[in-house]
Image: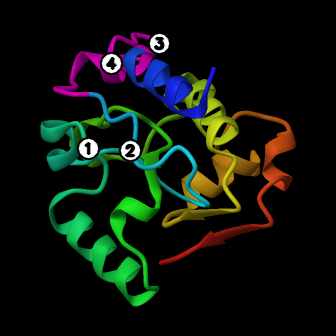
Amino acid sequence: MTAEETLAQIATEVSVCTACTLNQTRKRSVPGEGPANSEIMLIGEGPGFNENEQGRPFVGAAGRFLEELLAQAGLKRTDVWIGNVVKCRPPNNRDPQQDELAACDVYLERQISAINPKIIITPRSIPISSATNNGPGVGGTREWAMTPPAMTTIR
């Protein structure tokens, strides 16, 4: 299966996922988007209001800010793959809970494996701790955590 096919399959699975309670309040799942051969992955914490409405990551004010940051680096939104640790919006925009992180973990691991980026960028602490399993994520170190040569957190 190609990376594009894997990402499409994950998006389909996410759209009908009931592994945690976030599915009960979602309007649209937000599996992520971008080129399957991207060298850069940007992984956020979870969808917000606008993302829940549109089914796309980092839209609205967050999306405009992201596009400004990418432009400063000489990149466009279409150059990077953008997703979140959890694929459905947590109620009241709260931080994702342990069971929600665990439920979406399988999707994120498969996305990272399919894309195999050189760089993973996380704008908050939960995604990087989930990606490396040092913190609120599910226990143990993942093999892929060492695959990308750089994991960066921006604030």
Res 3 quadrant in image: top right
In magenta stretch: residue 76? no
- How far apart are the alpha carbons under marks 4 and 2? 14 Å
Mark 1 or mark 2: whose residue is earlier in sequence: 2
The percent coordinates of residue 99 (x first, y second) are: 54, 25
4 and 2 marks in contact (CB < 8 Å): no
Marks 1 and 2, how far apart in space? Answer: 7 Å
**Label 3: how many residues lie within 10 Å, few (<14), some (14-19) or many (20+)?**
few
- In the rendered view, tell whether residue 147 sits above or below residue 16: below
Kindly report which numbered mark, 3 or 1, lies closer to the viewer in this rendering: 1
Three-letter amino acid code at the position of disc 4: Ser
- Of callouts 3 and 1, the N-terminal one: 3
- In this rendering, the answer to whether 40 lies above or below 18 is below
SS at circle 2: loop
In the rendered image, which quarter contains the N terminus? top right
Mark 1 neighbour density, 10 Å: few (under 14) some (14–19) many (20 or more): many
User: Of the numbered discs in the image, which one, if any, rests on residue 33?
Assistant: 2
Q: Secondary structure at mark 1?
A: loop
Name the kind of residue labelled 1 in the image: Arg
* Residue carrying label 3: 19
Rendering coords of residue 89 (x, y %): 29, 37
Which mark is nearer the camera, 2 or 3? Answer: 2
Residue labelled with disc 1: 56
Amino acid under disc 2: Glu
From which residue to which does the magenta span run? 13-28
Q: CA distance from mark 2 to mark 3?
A: 21 Å
Task: Pinpoint residue 30: horizontal percent, then vertical percent.
Answer: 32, 35
